[in-house]
Image: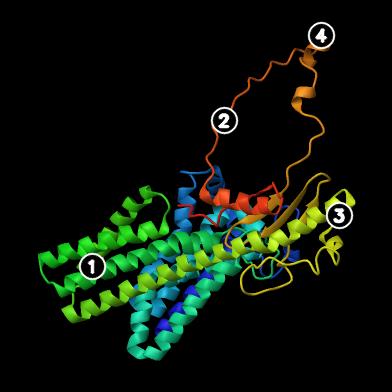
Amino acid sequence: MLRFAYLVGVLGLAVFYYYFFGAGPTPSEYIEDLEWWRPWGTAMHWPVLMGLAQMARAGLPQALEPILLGWLPPLLVAGVGWRVLRSALGRALLVFLTLLMLVFVYYGLRAEQVWRFFEWRFIAVAASFCAVVTAIAFAATLLDETLRRSRALALVATLAALAGIFLLSTEVTGTNSTMQFNISPWPIITLFGFLLAGATIAALHAASGAALFVSARMPGALGVGLGLFAAAAVSALAGWFIFSSPRALAPLVVLGLVVAGVRLLLGRRAPQSAARAGAIRFATGVVLLVAIMGSATIAGAMQRHARDVTALQVLDALEAYKKDNGGYPDSLDALVPKYLAQVPRPPIGLIRDEDDRFSYSNYGDSYALEFASVLWVQCQYSPPYEFAASDKDAPEDEADTSDSPYETAKPKTPAVAAAPKQPSEEDLALKATLAKHGLNGSWTCPKEPPKLW
């Protein structure tokens, strides 16, 4: 009962932090008109704290003092709670609420404009990001604890977690904030939550689990050495799986060795128990990595299908319409029913809704066809503009012909030729696909969602 009451108290502190540090009303707003979910912004507008508020707005390093003062209470509460709470679930909830309060303090003091931009989505995005990071960080411990209670329950929980990773990776686009299932107008959850923090933590699970298992099977200094070697090898392999730049491998290997070393020091137990814990941690890391990176791969396949199959139907219809009518239509509805039976919709995830549709803009001699793709990509196709005249047709030294004493001759801009960029195989394949349909425009998403790290 005491532990439950402690968690309830931490939750109450988190609610207070949300309203106290959150981005409050602007000078043009009245506090009595605020919706119930809107923060008060007390930390930045209360006269007692105006000195700290000015330090926060001044930038680093001056902002460190108010930020650390705001962080101190939740960190102290988390330290005490770690001793009070013994279960993995209780500690996970404690860490989740603590991370959330740290986010409230930082963004409330240093980035009010970001909070206001997200509007009601800020709390959803912040809570989702903290929940994803915490759940992945505690995944091995939670699985171990659940397995001791019920294998069936552990299987159900694992399948639910994998389904959640897949749905968030393929449904949250990160580009269209009006979509029904998109709570993140920026790729906070998919890009930073899963593909950076989540994948890195999963790699550390696998590395430390391998070290625990190997050292338990071979006690002594040799076992520790082989365990650390296994951790380094697993970290390097996972880094190759996650990152596109080889320079990211070394930091991950070092981090994997540090985490594995700490696990070996703190995890001294009977060899059989240590081997079991290591195996569970290793399996958890591998399953999480496959789920996160596999979901991103499937999302990339959805994007390619929307771009190379679904969108091509619309592009062909637009060109046929222009050939018959001498120009592009004002809307895609004009293509129905002569050129298209109905306007197709790009496959954005598995859950289909009314917001999954193409956006079309007519520019006269050109147009833009867009769709909000999975993960964080906005795809747009445009044909080349048809210019009536080129620069060579313009009169030379036009500025020199003026007789006004207030005008000076404009210097000629030297022609600078940029080094041609070699197209990749994906670029050439996409260009060939468009050429088969008589199209010579370009996409802003010529590849699948790339590895950014």
| x, y percent for residue 190 | 53, 63
Which quarter of the picture shows residue 88?
bottom left
Residue shown at the point (34%, 77%) measured from the top left: 141
Q: Which residue is mark 2?
A: 418
* Classed neighbour count for the residue bearing mark 1: other residues with Cα under 10 Å, few (<14), some (14–19), many (≥20): many
**Alpha carbons under labels 3 and 4: distance apart:** 47 Å
> Which disc, if any, is residue 405?
4
Q: Which residue is mark 1?
A: 211
Which quarter of the picture shows residue 274?
bottom left
* Mark 2 vs 4: CB contact within 8 A: no
**Alpha carbons under labels 3 and 1: distance apart:** 63 Å
Residue shown at the point (63%, 54%) measured from the top left: 433
The mark lying in front, picked from 1 and 4, is: 1
Q: In the current view of this chain or complex, which residue is farthest to the right?
A: 325
In the rendered image, the quadrant that contains the N terminus is bottom left
Q: Is residue 424 left or right of residue 200?
A: right
Disc on the earlier residue, 3 or 4: 3
Q: Amino acid at mark 2?
A: Ala
* Mark 2 vs 3: CB contact within 8 A: no
The mark lying in front, picked from 2 and 4, is: 2
* Classed neighbour count for the residue bearing mark 2: other residues with Cα under 10 Å, few (<14), some (14–19), many (≥20): few
* Mark 1 vs 4: CB contact within 8 A: no
| x, y percent for residue 416 | 60, 24
Disc on the earlier residue, 1 or 4: 1
Q: Which residue is mark 3?
A: 330
**Alpha carbons under labels 1 and 4: distance apart:** 80 Å
| x, y percent for residue 148 | 32, 88
**Alpha carbons under labels 2 and 4: distance apart:** 37 Å
Secondary element at image label 4: loop
Q: Judge whether 113 appears above or below 202 on screen.
A: above
Q: Amino acid at mark 4?
A: Pro
